Image (cartoon, coloured by chain):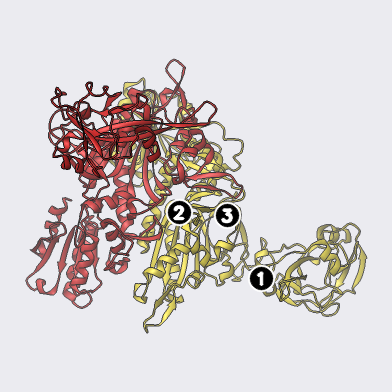
Chain colours: A red, B yellow
Amino acid sequence: MRASQFHISTKKEAPADAEIVSQKLMLRSGMIRKEAAGIYNYMPLAVRTLKKVEKIIREEMDKAGSLEIVMPMVQPAELWMESGRWQKYGDELLRLKDRHGREFALQPTSEEVVTDIARQEINSWKQMPVNFYQIQTKFRDERRPRFGLMRGREFVMKDAYSFDRNEEQAVKSYKLMFDAYCRIFDRLGLVYRPVRADSGAIGGNLSQEFQVIADTGEDVIVYCPESDFAANIELAPALSVIEKRAEPTEEMKMVATPGKEKCETMTEYLGLPLTKSVKAIVLAIDRKDEEGKELPAKVVLLLVRGDHSLNEVKAGKVDILKGGYRFATDDEIMNTFGSKPGYLGPVGLSKDVPVIADLTVANMSDFVVGANKEGYHITGVNWGRDLPEPTQVVDLRNVVEGDMSPDGKGKLTMQRGIEVGHVFYLGDRYSKPLKATFLDENGKPQIIHMGCYGIGVSRLLGAAIEQNHDDKGIIWPKAMAPFEVVICALGYDKSEAVREKADTLYNKLKADGVDVILDDRGLRPGVMFADWELIGVPHRITIGDKGLKDGVVEYTNRRDMNTEKVSYEQVEELLKEKLKY
Amino acid sequence: MRASQFHISTKKEAPADAEIVSQKLMLRSGMIRKEAAGIYNYMPLAVRTLKKVEKIIREEMDKAGSLEIVMPMVQPAELWMESGRWQKYGDELLRLKDRHGREFALQPTSEEVVTDIARQEINSWKQMPVNFYQIQTKFRDERRPRFGLMRGREFVMKDAYSFDRNEEQAVKSYKLMFDAYCRIFDRLGLVYRPVRADSGAIGGNLSQEFQVIADTGEDVIVYCPESDFAANIELAPALSVIEKRAEPTEEMKMVATPGKEKCETMTEYLGLPLTKSVKAIVLAIDRKDEEGKELPAKVVLLLVRGDHSLNEVKAGKVDILKGGYRFATDDEIMNTFGSKPGYLGPVGLSKDVPVIADLTVANMSDFVVGANKEGYHITGVNWGRDLPEPTQVVDLRNVVEGDMSPDGKGKLTMQRGIEVGHVFYLGDRYSKPLKATFLDENGKPQIIHMGCYGIGVSRLLGAAIEQNHDDKGIIWPKAMAPFEVVICALGYDKSEAVREKADTLYNKLKADGVDVILDDRGLRPGVMFADWELIGVPHRITIGDKGLKDGVVEYTNRRDMNTEKVSYEQVEELLKEKLKY
């Protein structure tokens, strides 16, 4: 490709509404152009990268035995009603009507359609395992689309679905996909980590996310450097940081703590360590009687240590809260506790209020809690002696740096990540409501076991840039770069020698199968270099009259920006080594 | 690929609602599965063919200098309002609203978005020519979707758009695309014909369709075997079949023709040749006064010879009819002519009614027309003597087999075709309303000249099958076949010898880059052969114990179904020759 025949359209500044670095760099380099909120045009540079990513995904999916299909963007409402998602999905599911008034949805994922395919196509256990994937446009009507390709509304996703005759086989299919995903992200040249993820209502632990590591990531990853434990913080088990509850040593005492509503200010005021305090979180569960009339909400008290934070995903798994919960209103709190928030605690509480304590809280002694009286706390509180044991003791909190890994092999540490893939064992979540059955070896109908496996293809571009950039622009990993090599021909329009040497090298590299672009635009060196540093091509060869006098050209590596002189005759050899082709 | 690991799912019968052969064969072979009216899943076999077609299109588009982009499926209404198509497109444009109530359209094509890109990206004449293409899902909400992929609602289209600084350059871009299209359809191995097509309101003659020749095609193509003239019948010029008007020889005479309302029955009744009769077609143009109040419609009389048929596209280009017309109602006809249809003619007509005569009609003499009196015609009518010369003489009729080619080089003949591509010079149709301008060499703003170029990618699958099939199934051209070669291993599950020879050949062919599938399912020969004949793989190698005893396997060509014995050792050579790899 010659730059003069490629549409290069870089900008000095990103639009004012661009928020994060990948979005800014993609807009500035001309990879994407916004058409509407969360809806982008992929310009030629982006399409080159997209196609390379798609090719690697295809190759690894094919190798793993998955079969490519294409399902429709526009999907009939009836199927979504069968799965229950038409009702439950909320506003992110874009619903529409055709000219005859029939209802459809734009696919955000394709579980319903693929299950419909399976129930029609799969009749016998002999037809499984089978796994279908597609790389296709998806749409999610995000309330607040932002961050460019990271949280767009229209995006490209690879989604795969496995079908098996029992759980054992389904787990095998899951592992095949997990391995394929590792190969895909390895080949893309990204630093990533597969982590355990929440499996929501499905249960089980077969749910893992692939996180591209980046300081700007929205997700928090917890891992143990001494073992292979890694999980999304939503899911990472938090052990008790106190091995065993100590005997009481203090008397319970009410103390005035005027205006000290936070554990931090309260303990500081009392001269106690923060780790002696207990945070009270009041939740409410809405209830109805048998005739559907609203009853007063059930109030529940959750306790975590003062220096810990509540993990809402874990809270949602507590039996009593599984059906859904919300934070209690100030009125509900006042009615139950007799005090406003900031001074709440479990001492003297009505037996009607379940007290759910975090593992650590249950092992605390001589601790401080709110007195259920505005401006007062109680110190020296001990379980059993001063109040009943908690109704339930469970893991309720987010882990913190330095916590022991749940496998006991070391201490936990944290980093931030961007979710780019998710592998998930679905079981019968879709096959049961859609009645996707098969006949087993004994001719008996059985429900198909499913798994689903997604990769955010367009999101990967943003994630790669969040991980790989500097103040000059993007630094593409080789496998994702729109071009592997750029030849910057200085004075291409003026110098016969430059033109001849640049053209010759360009044609040689092309013949070798190198994805090379020749910048023949005749721009000033500074402008030309800035373009390619912004666009992020990994390897640059600069050819100019000055060097050619000595038979020399320059090689610049985009990542470290090191430049070395190399004889024109040896430049092909050098690139061969850098690119390993 | 091994058949046991590929999802092969053929059916003996097509669903009852399948109408045409390509639809039936794609459903029976398991290429597509219907999800809703006009909305299909592309199953693994179809995706293999789709990807091969897309690859050829990409290669040729890239070679022609077009740059691949991806535009959104969901496009903002505002752009479609700017071009006027939001109002004009009709119900085929699927309109929808997002969660915030903003209006969008699902792209049926992408002129608006690409022009929006151009007006933002192109500022200078130096940035052109530039040509962008995408291969992307499209949606048209057809009133009556049918014929499988031939007239679906959701489909895959390659659309390209060229941008140039003047008409001369735009014509060059058009020709580049025309040539690329010829290479694409050549490489796909289809019998096709580029034909002149209607350019609608744009005018000019830079509008050509690529028609895949098939008896079942919906379009009629007119061509001259002695020259390169070829056109859609909508556009093919029809010369006068009478060179010069002869002098009158008969007297005008009213004759009774009771119940003879058709030219055919009337001339038969009168013992005259059909070519002596003139068909009267009455059109109406709706009119309003300056205040927008409806006026009585303007009635217009069109005349074509009795054996000819009206071409409505040509009629729409007559000046007076350009603004739109309809067929007149019986009341309007009665009010104007004083007779019911079947007995209408130009003799004695009010001067207020324009008479538009076809070229042939204007050269007729001693002809027969309706008498404007029920049950009567007039014979021996002659222009000038019996009635004024026609108000306008133009080409109004469809050509018929045997007409002279407009280039005078031979007689016209006809065949049927399926439109799979269209190249079109747009001029300023979109760039003007969307204000897509650039600065010319003199720094003066000018409107960009555009062209658009479409290929119905998914439709091509249907068209190829309409052209290439027999009673056993599909006969894929090599370039489009989901697999090039199938190895049918008879008794793969039982015979060690068959297994060893089949596996060896399979691995060799794969290593040679042949797209081969090994049928290792252990099915009975009849069932296995029927599957592959239905699916349409061009080359079949059959390996069985019986032949192997003599070191022989069978080669079968799908197109002619000829089978030849070949020694196992030579089969690779044979395939090399057949496939030319």
Write down the chain letter for disc 1: B
Alpha carbon separation for disc pair 1 and 2? 32 Å
Decide: is A276 above or below B421.
above
Judge if badges 1 and 2 mark residues of a common chain. yes
The residue indicated by pointer 1 is B323
Q: Name the mark on residue B92.
A: 3
Q: Are marks 3 and 1 on the same chain?
A: yes
Residue A511 place in picture, x, y as percent: 23, 58
Q: Is residue A276 left or right of residue B306?
A: left
Where is the N terminus of chain B found, in terms of image quarters?
top left
Q: Are marks 3 and 1 in contact (CB under 8 Å)?
A: no
Element marked by disc 3:
helix
Residue bearing the label numbered 2: B73
Give amino acid for label 2.
Met
Tell me which amino acid carries mark 3: Glu
Which one is in front, A530 or B149? A530
Along the polypeptide, which appears first: circle 1 or circle 2? 2
Question: Counting residues from the N terminus, which is met first, the one under dot 3 or under dot 1?
Answer: 3
Quarter location, residue B196: bottom right
Residue at disc 1, secondary structure: loop
Q: Earlier in the sequence, mark 2 or mark 3?
A: 2
